[in-house]
Image: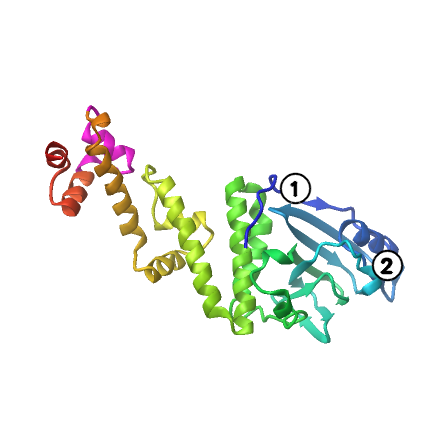
Amino acid sequence: MQIERTDPPSPARVEAPVRHLREWSSLLSQSFMNFSVESARPAQFRGSLGIRTIAGIDFIQMTTGSHAAYRDAKSIGAAERPDFLLCLQVAGVGEFLQDGRTARLNPGDITVFDTTRPTTVISSTHYRNLCMRFPQRLLDVPVAQMRQLTATRFDGREGLAPAAGAVLDTLNRVADTLPGRSQQLAAHNALDLMSTLFESTLGLADGRQRRAGAALLERMLDFIEKNLGDPELSPQTLAVTHFVSLRQVHSVFSAAGLTASAHILDRRLEHARRDLVDPALSGISVATIAERWGFRSASHFGRSFKEHFARTPADYRHTA
């Protein structure tokens, strides 16, 4: 799965609250997708819609009164991009019907549906949800297998669903504060987590987790190599930068027979060793080389170097 590089996330587009069901139908068609809508009290209907886009992924916040929305085959344009819509129930109750299944969601629950297939959504009063809409090709689960999961309720209290809901909510709230590279990583990791949730349900989790872990390790190793000169570089930095827990950082490195802290130290020492024996750098002091590769002090560098290479930096440089 590859997230495209895109422009910075768009500010949330919050449409003016609608005050009639026909306005809601028009708003959905213009800003979201085509639905036919029904309500027992169309003139009293109220609703609002907010959308922001991050790395090609739309985040949709919806607040509505009680109504039903129908998307039949005639409503689905042949040129529409095949997307999945993952929905987190925030308030009220929602029912999602697709492929002969019905998911009844309470707050915290999650479901997913395919935008290229007929769908019905029934909303209670005081209904609020947050959805993530993304191209089907970005998900590491074959579309044919995903059809086993459409309109399936993922209990917001069990398994990976609470983590998926928390990531969806957090990314939507903080995206505007993140620099561009962090937005890309956050979107990437969010989709990785969603793929893991789906593959776990399908019984494909072991292979998926190994691939996701290997990909995450590769990204973290690359980040380490590019930031060795930063004295703040640490396992905690890796966790924050890659939007994963510290425990996950340790787990991914452990699976490869490594520890994050030891790998960072090893790479710093190796780069420093190369500098010490580089004739072009013979006029640069040991302390400067230590600082260049992220060591907080020359004494710390000296102790670490001697433990690793059995000689002091000065001796190593002299005998090289």
Report crowding for label 2: few under 14, some 14 to 19, many 20 or more residues within 10 A (C-alpha).
few
User: In the depicted view, which residue is nearer to us: 243 or 14?
Assistant: 243
- Per the image, label 1 sits on a secondary structure element best described as loop
Mark 2 or 1 closer to N-term? 1
- Per the image, label 2 sits on a secondary structure element best described as helix
Q: From the image, tell me which residue sits under label 1.
A: 11
Which of the 4 quarters of the picture holds residue 1? bottom right
Residue 61, percent across and down? 68, 54
Residue 284 in the image: above or below residue 152: above
- Examine the structure image and report whether residue 225 is included in the region drawn in magenta: no
Residue 154, percent across and down? 60, 70
Mark 1 belongs to which amino acid? Pro
**Range covered by the magenta-colored residues:** 283-299
Residue visible at 37% across and 50% down?
236
Q: From the image, tell me which residue sits under label 2.
A: 44
Residue 188 in the image: above or below residue 5: below
Q: Quadrant of the C terminus?
A: top left
- Examine the structure image and report whether residue 284 is included in the region drawn in magenta: yes
Outermost residue, bottom side? 100
Residue visible at 56% across and 49% down?
3
Mark 2 belongs to which amino acid? Gln
